Image (cartoon, rainbow, N blue to C red):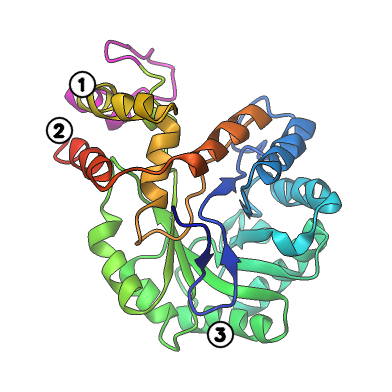
Amino acid sequence: MTTTVKIGHSDVVSGPLGLGTNKVGGHNLFKALDDQTGIQTVKAALDHGITMLDTAFMYGLGNSENLIGQAIADYDRHQIVIATKAAQDPDRELKPNNQPAFLTRQVDNALERLGTDYIDIFYIHFPDQDTPKYEAVGALERLKEAGKIRAIGVSNFSLEQLKEANQDGYVDIVEDAYNLIDRQAADTLMPYLQQHGISFVPYFPLASGLLTGKYRADQVFSADSWQAGKPNFQGARFAAITAALTDTVKPIADHHQATAAQVILAWYIQDPAIAVVIPGARTPEQATQNAGALDVTLSVDEVKQISEAFKRLPA
């Protein structure tokens, strides 16, 4: 299994498994979060071989960054890859702002919250409507030259926006939605990324828990549940996804003495088109379980079986 990954054109090197931290301090996104549990979750990830911490200003409006800063205080900073993101402007009702001056301030603010003097990867979290994307990335390039950031990323950009952002070849990494259930980025983004040496990080790799295997095929969701109305959790599509987990993923997981989630994460790790996979975790136990994916090495046939099982799902 891959042990290290170089990020784009930069000198950043990461392990293949990270921790998504929207549930570490992201009180504006999730209910009933505890900050101390969040700190312990980060520490558990680091203690079990996870090296990248993926956060953002939007996760608690800076609270996640603050908690990560506290969590890493007793660790060797140079062994940790910190990725953070910004775009939402508090002075514009959190609408995206890609203006160079704003992004520059956000990097400085993130550095202070994280308690570090450099950020390994800084993403523009969302595109705005007005700022030329090459100007936004140009501001990040100047911050890279100044040593404040080490790699430049964009997130949630369309292919055309990415091309504009990368017109000077400065983009190192892209973060976007991608998982076994929805592989649209494989057709829309990945060919361009591979052609230009840009790394790719998929978010929501476990599809909001659906790919962990915790749901039953006959499960019915109440009208007030967050799953209600979401196509992946309804009808024939939900049945096909749960069947693929039961019939294909579970036997492979049993063979490796692993969980379904660990096998799914291993599938991403072994995909050369993916740099780092960043599942989230709410508790130290979840982070530790995710880290177990590093011990799973799938055969070529197992990778193919999993890939095929989730193709041609009902709409």
Residue 110 point in image, percent of width and height: 74, 62
Residue 298: image x %, image y %?
35, 43
Residue at left offset 56%, top offset 85%: 138
Q: SS for tag 2?
A: loop
Which structural element holds mark 3?
Answer: helix
**Which of the two labelled residues, at mark 3 and mark 1, occupies the earlier sequence position?**
3
Residue 314 shows which numbered tag? 2
> What label sits on residue 138 in the rendered view?
3
Amino acid marked by disc 1: Gly
* Camera-nearest residue between 64 and 31: 64
The residue positioned 31% from the left and 30% from the top of the image is 252
Residue named by callout 1: 235
Mark before the other along the chain sequence, 2 or 1: 1
- Amino acid type, label 2: Pro
Are dots 2 and 1 in contact, CB under 8 Å? yes
Q: Residues within 10 Å of mark 2 (few under 14, many from 20)?
A: few
